[in-house]
Image: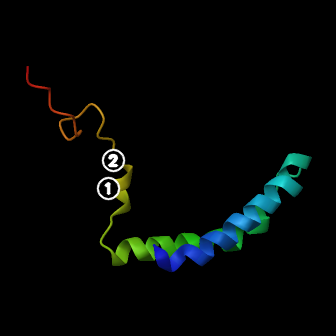
């Protein structure tokens, strides 16, 4: 996701400014950084697709299933 690093930094800077200058002062309108978030999100999704990473695989819940990776028991 190196290709998206600059976009992430720009979004993070915008978010931090919005959070400290607006949200904490009662202005909850989060549209200030919406364009940057969309561009960053699109970049991440494209990068995931280019690297054959399926978002649905990230969202799967493996805990408590037979697909959960577990540490093998220690031998006595």
State the residue lying farthest toward the front.
76
Is residue 24 depicted above or below 57 in this figure?
above
Say which quarter of the image contains residue 40.
Answer: bottom right
**Could you tell me which residue is drawn at 20 percent across and 41 percent down?**
67
Q: Position of residue 28 (x, y in %)?
A: 82, 51
How far apart marks 2 and 1 lie (CA) works out to: 5 Å
From the image, tell me which residue sits under label 1: 57
Residue 60 image label: 2
State the residue lying farthest toward the top.
76
Q: Where is the C terminus found, in terms of image quarters?
A: top left
Out of 60 and 9, give the one closest to the viewer: 9
Image check: 4 left or right of 51? right
The reply to whether residue 39 is in sight is: no
Out of 39 and 10, give the one closest to the viewer: 10
Is residue 15 depicted above or below 4 in this figure?
above
Image check: 18 left or right of 4? right
Q: Are marks 2 and 1 in contact (CB under 8 Å)?
A: yes
Image check: 19 left or right of 37? right
**Could you tell me which residue is drawn at 76 percent across and 59 percent down?**
16
Q: Position of residue 42 (x, y in %)?
A: 53, 74
The reply to whether residue 46 is in sight is: yes
Q: Position of residue 17 (x, y in %)?
A: 81, 62
Q: Position of residue 54 (x, y in %)?
A: 33, 64
Secondary structure under the numbered disc 1 in the rendered image: helix
**Could you tell me which residue is drawn at 86 percent across and 47 percent down?**
24
Say which quarter of the image contains residue 19.
Answer: bottom right
Q: Where is the N terminus found, in terms of image quarters?
A: bottom left
């Amino acid at each position: 996701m190196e290709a998206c690093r600059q976009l992430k930094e720009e979004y993070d800077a915008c978010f931090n400014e919005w959070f400290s200058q607006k949200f904490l002062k009662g202005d909850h309108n989060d549209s200030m950084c919406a364009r940057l978030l969309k561009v960053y999100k699109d970049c991440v999704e494209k990068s995931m697709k280019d690297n054959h990473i399926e978002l649905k695989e990230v969202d799967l819940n493996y805990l408590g299933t037979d697909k959960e990776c577990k540490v093998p028991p220690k031998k006595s």
